Amino acid sequence: MESSTNGDRIENGSADLMIRKKEEDEGFGDEKKEAAVVESVEMIFKDKEVPEWQNQLTIRAFVVSLGLGVLFTVIVMKFNLTTGIIPSLNVSAGLLGFFFVKTWTAFLERTGMLKQPFTRQENTVIQTCVVATSGIAFSGGFGSYLFGMSEAVAKQSSEALDAQNIKNPHLGWMIGFLFIVSFLGLFSVVPLRKIMVIDFKLIYPSGTATAHLINSFHTPQGAKLAKKQVRALGKFFSFSFLWGFFQWFFTAGEDCGFQSFPTFGLKAYANRFYFDFSATYVGVGMICPYIINISVLLGAILSWGIMWPLIQNRKGDWYTEPSNTSLHGIQGYRVFIAISMILGDGLYNFFKVLSRTLMALSAQLKNKGPGGVIPVTNSPSSGDPDAAASSFDDQRRTEVFLKDQIPTWLAFSGYVAIAAVSAATLPKIFPQLKWYYILVIYIVAPALAFCNAYGCGLTDWSLASTYGKLAIFTIGAWAGKSHGGVLAGLAACGVMMNIVSTASDLMQDFKTGYMTLASPRSMFVSQVIGTAMGCVLAPSVFWLFYNAFPNLGDPDSQYPAPFALAYRNMAILGVDGFSSLPKYCLLLCCIFFFGAMLINAVKDFTPPKWSRFIPLPMAMAIPFYIGSYFAIDMCLGSLILFVWEMMDKAKAAAFAPAVASGLICGDGLWSVPSSILALAGVKPPICMKFLSRGVNSDVDKFLGGS
């Protein structure tokens, strides 16, 4: 799902932003907000010394980051390979990082062995490193462009099946590819950090929210609440892990277990309407805003409840392909209509964010003060205590932020050096991706990285996957199908996505560091180390899934990887045109493409009071080809949260994210032992299946007769 969503996920932080907007609309936390306005945050910490940037980078911070990085990489990978909906895990990363280090330092303090206290700057380093590590699991394309290169996905499209348009995953080249392309975005925007954060005062809502979270953790009241939240997270983590373990015993065969429970009857189950008892997506439903969950459910009803049964009735007229997985049959309608909605939504938001970026940039440049810095809105001389507090915070944060400069020459030389190396080595991995394609991408990428980082600062939306899709069509068409254009387009998508995604992520981290007085140098080093961890961990975790589940990527399997097929078919469209589409599919695609843009436009021009009830086309598109089972899970999570808020709003606001994180983390962690058991050949002992009365009677007769 596109956000955050970053690409095809709920945008890193956009889910948090939408939740915060919902809470503000409904009046949550008004007293806290009023108190926060009057009191200067930095005044609370004025007696605490800010450690040097080297001291913010501690061994214990990176040990904790590595452990949490493994956990969150597994979770994100599972999301990638199931539905592609990836919620923001920033809160979980910051909360667990605080808990583990705080527990360790408290123990050392009691024994008199504590040499360095735990600071909010170190907490920021941990959160940055963990998110950078798990972020590679998304931008690495294991559920989209990278896995879309494989033979397993290619067979589902029945197009471009020649060897030069297929490249199967292998641990070696995946790690090499990520190390080559994942660091360029970091160097592309480093010189702009002062302009973005201080001069233009961009909000970066996710970065700001993370900073407020970390700052609150390190006050006495915040530390007490954080401990309670971690206990709640731990309880539901244990429950979720044990529930996943329990379910495993009943999955000895295909379509066995609780995940195949026909909740609404066998007819509904055949049309993928059922509750699959997934703790993960119940937790996701508690984190995601209500409108996302409802949009997913509406998309499922529109597609599997109405459209696909009607189109199946036209079999023999509109299409003749009997296979349910061939793109020349019913699957073609499912996949390409979903792609058209994704593209329509993505292009609309691209132009919207780009126009806002250009207008805001133009206005800020015109209003820029003679000293090169946009003046603070309020002045302490006005006698306003709010303005005085804000001014003190700005001055203190600006002073620390400008103290440890990152040399501009380092950024430029780093970008040029990595670009030169990748231009020379990427064609070795992908011979179809010529060096001059790569050169064009690297010339254009810094400008796009700036646009993405700036737009993310305004709206909290990263459009990394949209830029990646543009690369798919342009480079794929340039190369041509006969010269491996499908593979070239997918590889170019990976290069572009990694650059623009890491650029916006780094600027979010700079904003977080600015508000927690963490040094830009420590932020940059933490991001680099986290990215390096992710370049090894993400391919390794994917390799575990790939080897443990032979049917990975199959639409009817436990891990269908829906966006892998979508991205591959975008590449096929880029090089092959629309000739392979079934009858009337192009017409339906155009209707849904422009329909997605129209819905977005209506949502933007409708007053907020009513626009929050208008569904999101991107969320509606996801169930079009994977069904609605996860939509049922997510809506159940929304229902739990709604009832909880009706009973106790304050407690729900404080603990719902922790409970949801526990459900997600526990079920996600169970994926590791289940994969290891599969690799070891250990199979569950029981198959729990559900049959209709007639089929069951036939089975009984057969068994009785034998």
Image: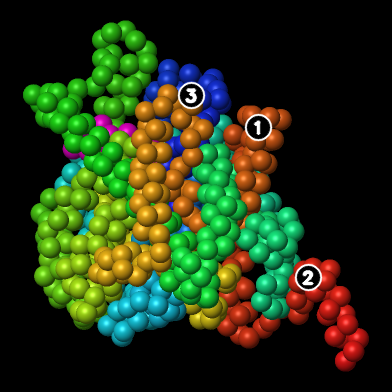
Q: How dense is the environment of label 3, judged by Cα within 10 Å: few (below 14), some, or many (20 and up)?
A: few
Q: CA distance from mark 1 to mark 3?
A: 20 Å
* Residue contact between numbered discs 3 and 2, judged by CB atoms under 8 Å: no
Residue 376, horizontal then vertical, whole percent = 24, 22
* Residue contact between numbered discs 2 and 1, judged by CB atoms under 8 Å: no
Q: CA distance from mark 2 to mark 1?
A: 39 Å
Which element carries disc 2, helix, strand or loop?
loop
* Residue contact between numbered discs 1 and 3, judged by CB atoms under 8 Å: no
Q: Residue furthest right?
A: 704
Three-letter code for the amino acid on which mark 2 is drawn? Leu
Question: At x 67% / y 83%, what residue is drawn?
Answer: 682
Q: Nearer the viewer, residue 379 or 147?
A: 147
Q: Nearer the viewer, residue 422 or 561?
A: 561
Q: Which mark is residue 645?
A: 1
**Is residue 337 left or right of 450 when viewed as pictured?**
right
Q: Quadrant of the C terminus?
A: bottom right
Q: Which mark is residue 499?
A: none
Q: Is residue 83 magenta?
A: no
Q: Residue furthest bottom?
A: 706
Question: At x 24% / y 75%, what residue is drawn?
Answer: 481
Residue linked to disc 2: 691
Which residue range is magenta in the image? 195-206
Q: Quadrant of residue 253?
A: bottom right
Q: Quadrant of residue 644?
A: top right
Q: How many marks?
A: 3
Residue linked to disc 3: 609
Which element carries disc 3, helix, strand or loop?
helix
- Name which of mark 1 and mark 3 comes first in the sequence: 3
